[in-house]
Amino acid sequence: MNDRNMVMARRVAEAVALEGGCTYYVGGFVRDRLLGRENKDIDIEVHGIPVQTLEKILDSLGERLTLGASFGIMGLRHYELDIAMPRLETATGLGHKDFAVFVDPFLGAEKAARRRDFTMNAMMEDVLTGEVLDFFGGQEDMRRGRIRHVDDMRFVEDPLRALRACQFAARFGFAVAEETVRLSSGMDLAALPGERIMGELEKALLKAEKPSIFFEELRKMRQLSVWFPELEALIGLKQNQAFHPEGDVWVHTMQVLDEAAALRAEAKQPLWFVLSALCHDMGKAVTTQEIGGVIHAYQHEKLGLPLVQAFLERMTRETKLTQYVLNMTELHMRPNMLVDCGSGVKSYMRMYDSALCPEDLLLLAKADNLGRVGPESNRDAMCAEYAQTENRLREMLALYDERMSSPFLMGRDLVDAGLAPGPLFTEALAYAHKLRLAGKPKEEQLKYALSLMQKQKDKT
């Protein structure tokens, strides 16, 4: 698909050149080409010809689309190609909301590039010649692994750029430049819409090898308090070193987050899963105490649920996501505890039955266990040791799946047996489900359910 779109980009560029203009690849496409990374989003920018001339060129090449009239962005049907003209943007409101946009085909390449956020995103590549225009040192910054803003005045107009700096740092394994950290520290993030925060967070959680960099860079900027206060509260919060040689709850959470990122491809719900890793120990902020010289955080997995809910609802209204993360948070300790305690089959069946996604719960338990790498810890040895725990958990999960896939008692079976829906009906189905978890066949479930209902009737 990229080849097809690039062929069309060249056709546009050739037609533009005949009219005296020039066409450049811009933005992330240039950055990723230089980094040797794949990027399916192709953006080109056309300079030096009137808007009407570009429209005629596109009309001659296919069905022209208007993707953003006020931004001067066009496209062609059946092609994944954004075609823009140089523009200037000026903030007119608080947060990432209101901007005045001025399209100017004759603005010039350097001025057009200056509106970009970071030097690595401000490079331009001539579509026809391959020449790279790098006015602000983007290639050198990439070589040094640095995220650096282009222009002081333009950068601070959009506070979302502070978070963009952090998510780029996480995705590329870079560090935010000191001067960009200083500028970002003074930005007011409070006016930003929650969905934009979630958008940047999602990119870090799903695209970064180490999403912890996103939060570590925000910490350097002193920008955790507005949107991530529940995480900021974990900084310096002590843990029992016998179980957590890695350090405080913040360090543990960041290590678990990175372990979860390494497992997210296996998750049924990758984003929700990694968010669960981020939230799993938030409750320690309200439960940690020292008793007899020993640090405890009793019931943090339950008492922290209001914190997790407030954290998520600040950024998303996706109810199923919130329910999933709350469920995972509440259950995150259970799998490893059952193995450590030598629990019986019944306990495993109950746990899996209470989990919204048992498979992901096991991944979270694994990430939580491996996120305890202290200065003297041997991670390879920890992985080998945990394999025994994981094998037991998956053995029990397979048994649970087997029992859940067997025929089971349903309401219509009770109706067919001559029983009318009602309170006893509901109670009988709940009792039958317990028998199903115990591995009892459907016939036995029905027998017990009918017997229970008869006893209840006899009492009345």
Image: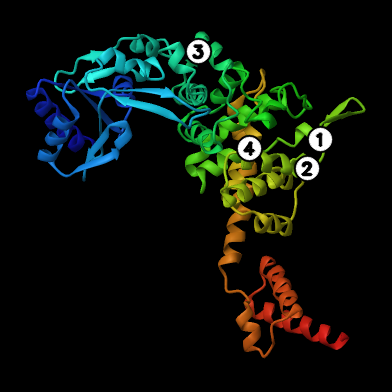
Whether residue 148 is visible, yes or no, is no
175 left or right of 39? right
According to the image, label 3 marks what residue? Answer: 180
294 left or right of 214? right
Q: Residue visible at 15% across and 37% down?
A: 58
Amino acid type, callout 1 = Thr
Q: CA distance from mark 4 to mark 1?
A: 27 Å
Q: Residue visible at 57% across and 30% down?
A: 191
Query: Does dot 3 land on a helix, a strand or a loop?
Result: helix
Q: Earlier in the sequence, mark 2 or mark 3?
A: 3
According to the image, label 4 marks what residue? Answer: 386
According to the image, label 1 marks what residue? Answer: 287
Quarter the N terminus occupies? top left
Contact (Cβ within 8 Å) of mark 2 with mark 1: yes
Q: CA distance from mark 2 to mark 1?
A: 7 Å
Contact (Cβ within 8 Å) of mark 3 with mark 1: no
| Nearer-the-camera pick, 156 or 118 | 156
Whether residue 397 is visible, yes or no, is yes
